[in-house]
Image: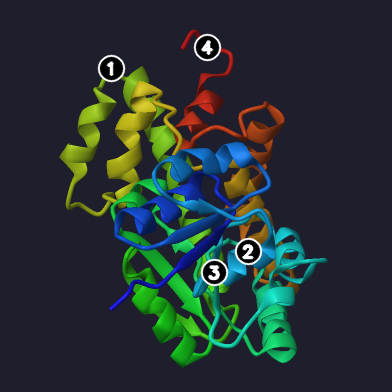
Amino acid sequence: MSQTRIGVVGVGVMGSAIAGRFLRTGHAVTLRDRDPGKTAPLAAEGAAVADTAEALMAASDVVILSLNTAEIVEAVVFGAEGLAAHARPGLLLIDMSSIDPGATAAMAARLRAETGMGWVDAPLSGGAPAAAVGRLTLMMGGEAPEVERAREVLRAVAANMTHMGPAGAGQTTKLINQVLCACNFLAIAEATRLAQDAGVDAERIPAALAGGRADSRILQEFMGKMARRDLTPTGRIDNMLKDLEATQRFAMALRTPMPLTGLVAELHRIMVAAGIGGEDSAAYMKMFDFGTAR
């Protein structure tokens, strides 16, 4: 049986990791990105590159989006010569971006009404390293038959997939995920600096705490990275700020108090204002290095 043909729109850090995993698991992959330089490495490995939305849709059974904002997603799908203009029966759109839940629900309904095409929101956790080895966690929203179809396709990149409800429910769950991750990242950065100032080898702490209540995947993956100031890209601080601000808007509409999230968001704004928004999560350590010899 032939593999599902995958189209990927948005080939940044995450999009390239997702597309690369599909390519290396035997899928035909077609890429589209505004920046041709981002598609070149995967094209060298055998991915096709579409110059137009029409070409991408013609070459794909499933189209995956990995984009930064709801506005960009809307423009890519519904803009002039967008994906919707070239929809056909049987195509499925899977949005792996992290965007507003309400906007997602509205766009999913619009796509179905205008084209009959299904939309599954499947934002992710685990970052590029997990995508590269097929270990992402996905929070999914949409109609059950389409979510099941998406699940079969996404087994190549994900180990944990949960259907949370109708369109937008996956995005709501992702906002909750980002609150937990952002608070944990900054707590680990702060603890790393405390360990270093106290003369304790911070790179040994993850092993020392493994299995205890303070343990977490972020601790295991990032404390040593932070201690070494290893800025190898796995994500971006400004993307986390984007998600925190989306969470604040969502919570404000519900009048849900989120004082810790507010503080963490302000600290992210400080880091973005300081010019490190484009750097990896390990660069949280720079906030604790301001004004020191480190």
Residue at position x 25%, y 22% from top?
200
Marks 4 and 2, Cα distance to the nearest angstrom?
A: 53 Å
Helix, strand or loop at mark 2: helix
User: If you read the primary sequence from the N terminus, does the residue marked by circle 4 or circle 2 appear first?
Assistant: 2
Is any atom of residue 236 visible in this view?
no
**Percent coordinates x, y for residue 198 in the rendering:** 32, 20
In which quadrant will I find the N terminus?
A: bottom left
Q: Is residue 24 left or right of residue 67?
A: left
Q: Tell me the residue that label 2 is attached to.
A: 55
Q: Amino acid at mark 1?
A: Gly
User: If you read the primary sequence from the N terminus, does the residue marked by circle 4 or circle 3 appear first?
Assistant: 3
Q: Amino acid at mark 2?
A: Ala
Q: Is residue 237 left or right of residue 105?
A: left
Q: Tell me the residue that label 3 is attached to.
A: 63
Helix, strand or loop at mark 4: loop
Q: Amino acid at mark 4?
A: Thr
Number of marks in picture: 4
239 or 110: which is nearer to us?
A: 110
**Image depth: mark 4 or mark 3 in front:** 3
Disc 3 crowd, CA 10 A, few/some/many (<14, 14-19, 20+) = many
User: If you read the primary sequence from the N terminus, does the residue marked by circle 1 or circle 2 appear first?
Assistant: 2
Helix, strand or loop at mark 1: loop
Q: Tell me the residue that label 1 is attached to.
A: 199
